[in-house]
C-alpha cells in the first residue's frame, strides 16, 4: 500500500469534497460556518508512523487500538486548535505501517460538522475509487464526476416549516440553559474545544469492545417479534439498542449503588457531585438517526454533510432494574421503535428550526447533563458498506472507531462479512465497563473482545 498513491488520491478526493479543506468561522455565539477559500485552504494533515509491532500480533489481539503507537489516532469529541491562532483541522489522516511492511492501519478522523457516518462512507469510497484507478495506472487523470453535495443550505431548502406548538419529544430535548452554556457559546471554537478537551482528559475514560454474532441477533429478534405480537416492523437496530440500554443501565445503577456504600469519601463525592439515580425515574438513550429518507419529497441521497439528528428513547428505570428477560427486552425494543416512528418530517423541522435556533443548545447537555448517570448515546454504523472500500490492495480486515474518549457512548460497527455480526464499542469509566463485563444478561449475548 503506497503512501505516495494514498496521499495523491486523498488530495484528489478533497477536490470533490472541498469542505474538508475549509475553515471554521463563528458568525455569532454558538453558530459556526465552514468557509472554503481556494486561495487559503486549510488542508487536512496526512502523516505516517512506522510501528515495531508485528501485524500478526496486532491481529491476535483483536486489533486493539491500544497497541498502536502514540499519535496514530488523533480523535477528539470537540473542535480544538491552538490558543493563539485557533487553526482547526477538519480531518486528520494517519497511516501506521507494521513491522516488515506486513500490514497497515488507516486512521481517518473527520469533524462531525463536516460529515456524518453516511457522508464519511461516501468520502471513503470516493477516495478508494481514485486510489484504485491510480494503482492500475499511475498516470490516470480521469476519475469521473462526484455527485456529492455538502452545502447545508441544500438540507435547509427541503426542511418544511414547523408547526406550533413544538412536539413533546422536541420539548424534552431542549435542556434549560444558563450563564455557563451562554459563555461556552460566546467563546471561540478553538478555545472552547481546548477547555472541553482538558476537562475530558482529566476523567477516567476507557474503551471496551464486545462482539454480538448474527445468530444471537437473529434469535433475539425472532423472540421479540413473537412476544410483541404486533405487525409493526421491529429492526435489528431496535433490538440491539434495547439490549445495550438494558445492560448499560443495570451496570451504571449497580456501580452507583456500590460507590454510595463504599465509604465516607465516596459517599460525599456522590452526594455532592454524582449520582442522580435515587432521584431519576427514567433512563434516556439518545440515538443518532439519519434523516435523509425521512423528509417527504426530498432528495438527499447525495448530501454528504451531517444529516444526523438525535432521537430520545425514554424508559422507566424501574423497568430496566428488573431481571433482564426477553419480555423486558421486548418492551424496551418497542420503545426504541416508537421513537424511531416519531422521527417524522415535522420532528426534523422542529429540531432544525427550533432547538438548533438556540445559540447555546448544543452546549447545554455538555454542561448541565454531564453528571447525569442515566443516559447513553448510541450510534449504529453497522449497516454501512465499509468492507467494500478497496484502495487497490484489497478490502479491510477490520473497521472500528478511533480511540475517542467521549463517555456514555456506544458505537456499533459491522464485523468482517466472513464473520458477520456487530462489534459494540463502549466508552465510559473503567469501573462501569467492568460492570458491563460482569452483567449476566450482556455476557450471555455478547463476547468480550478487548
Image (cartoon, rainbow, N blue to C red):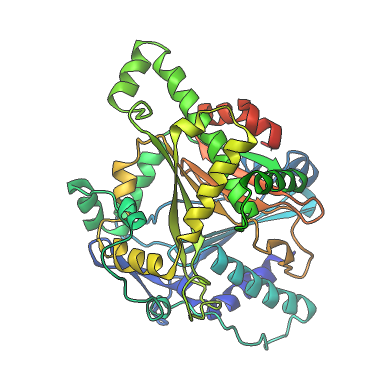
Q: Nearer the viewer, residue 398 or 39?
A: 398
Q: Quadrant of residue 104?
A: bottom right
Q: Residue at x 77, y 52 (%)?
A: 420
Percent position (x, y) of residue 334?
55, 48
Q: Position of residue 131 (x, y in %)?
A: 70, 74
Task: Give the residue at x 46% y 27%.
Answer: 253
Q: Residue at x 62, y 33 (%)?
A: 325
Hey, which residue is sitting farthest front in the picture?
A: 229
Residue 126 x %, y %: 63, 75
Numbered marks: total: 0
Give the residue furthest to the left.
179
Percent x, y of residue 301: 56, 77
Q: What residue sits 51% from the left and 71% below the top?
A: 292
Quarter of the image with the C terminus in it: top right
- Asked if residue 216 is positioned above or below residue 414 in the image, the reply reads above
Residue 313 seen: yes
Q: Is residue 304 left or right of residue 56?
A: left
In the shown orientation, is residue 259 left or right of residue 118?
A: left
Q: Is residue 72 visible?
A: no
Task: Compare residues 1 and 433 and report the one nearer the observer.
Answer: 433
- Picture layout, residue 364 above or below residue 36: above
Task: Please say if 329 is above or below 160.
Answer: above
Amino acid at each position: 500500500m503506497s503512501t505516495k498513491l494514498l496521499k495523491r488520491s486523498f488530495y484528489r478526493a478533497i477536490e470533490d469534497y472541498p469542505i474538508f479543506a475549509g475553515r471554521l468561522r463563528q458568525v455569532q455565539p454558538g453558530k459556526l460556518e465552514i468557509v472554503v477559500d481556494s486561495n487559503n485552504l486549510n488542508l487536512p494533515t496526512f502523516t505516517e508512523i512506522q510501528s515495531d509491532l508485528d501485524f500478526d500480533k496486532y491481529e491476535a489481539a483483536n486489533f486493539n487500538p491500544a497497541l498502536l503507537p502514540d499519535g496514530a489516532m488523533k480523535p477528539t469529541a470537540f473542535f480544538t486548535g491552538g490558543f493563539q491562532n485557533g487553526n482547526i483541522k477538519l480531518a486528520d489522516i494517519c497511516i501506521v505501517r507494521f513491522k516488515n511492511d506486513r500490514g497497515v492501519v488507516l486512521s481517518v478522523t473527520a469533524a462531525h460538522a463536516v460529515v456524518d457516518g453516511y457522508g464519511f462512507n461516501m468520502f471513503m469510497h470516493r477516495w478508494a475509487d481514485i486510489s484504485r484507478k491510480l494503482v492500475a495506472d499511475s498516470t490516470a487523470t480521469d476519475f469521473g464526476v462526484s455527485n456529492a453535495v455538502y452545502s447545508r443550505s441544500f438540507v435547509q431548502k427541503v426542511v418544511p416549516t414547523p408547526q406550533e406548538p413544538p412536539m413533546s419529544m422536541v420539548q424534552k430535548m431542549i435542556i434549560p440553559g444558563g450563564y455557563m452554556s451562554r459563555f461556552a457559546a460566546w467563546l471561540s471554537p478553538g478555545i472552547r474545544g481546548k477547555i472541553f478537551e482538558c476537562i475530558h482528559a482529566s476523567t477516567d475514560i476507557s474503551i471496551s469492545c464486545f462482539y454480538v454474532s448474527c445468530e444471537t441477533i437473529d434469535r433475539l429478534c425472532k423472540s421479540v417479534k413473537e412476544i410483541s405480537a404486533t405487525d409493526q416492523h421491529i429492526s435489528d437496530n431496535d433490538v440491539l439498542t434495547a439490549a445495550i440500554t438494558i445492560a448499560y443501565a443495570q451496570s451504571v445503577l449497580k456501580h452507583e449503588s456500590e460507590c454510595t456504600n463504599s465509604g465516607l469519601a465516596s459517599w460525599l463525592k456522590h452526594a455532592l457531585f454524582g449520582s442522580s439515580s435515587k432521584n431519576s425515574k427514567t433512563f434516556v438513550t439518545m440515538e443518532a438517526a439519519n434523516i435523509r429518507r425521512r423528509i417527504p419529497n426530498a432528495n438527499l441521497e447525495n448530501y454528504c454533510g451531517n444529516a444526523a439528528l438525535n432521537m430520545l428513547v425514554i424508559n422507566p428505570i424501574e423497568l430496566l432494574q428488573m431481571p433482564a428477560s426477553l419480555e423486558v427486552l421486548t418492551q424496551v425494543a418497542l420503545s426504541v421503535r416508537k421513537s424511531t416512528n416519531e422521527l417524522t418530517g415535522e420532528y426534523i423541522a422542529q429540531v432544525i428550526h427550533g432547538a438548533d435556533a438556540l445559540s447555546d443548545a448544543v452546549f447545554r447537555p455538555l454542561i448541565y447533563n454531564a453528571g447525569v448517570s442515566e443516559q447513553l448515546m448510541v450510534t449504529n454504523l453497522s449497516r454501512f458498506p465499509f468492507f467494500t472500500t478497496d484502495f487497490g490492495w484489497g478490502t479491510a480486515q477490520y473497521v472500528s472507531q478511533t480511540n475517542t474518549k467521549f463517555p456514555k457512548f456506544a458505537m456499533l460497527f459491522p464485523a468482517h462479512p466472513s464473520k458477520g455480526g456487530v462489534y459494540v464499542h463502549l466508552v465510559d469509566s473503567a469501573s462501569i465497563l467492568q460492570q458491563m463485563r460482569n452483567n449476566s444478561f450482556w455476557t450471555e449475548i455478547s463476547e468480550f473482545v478487548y
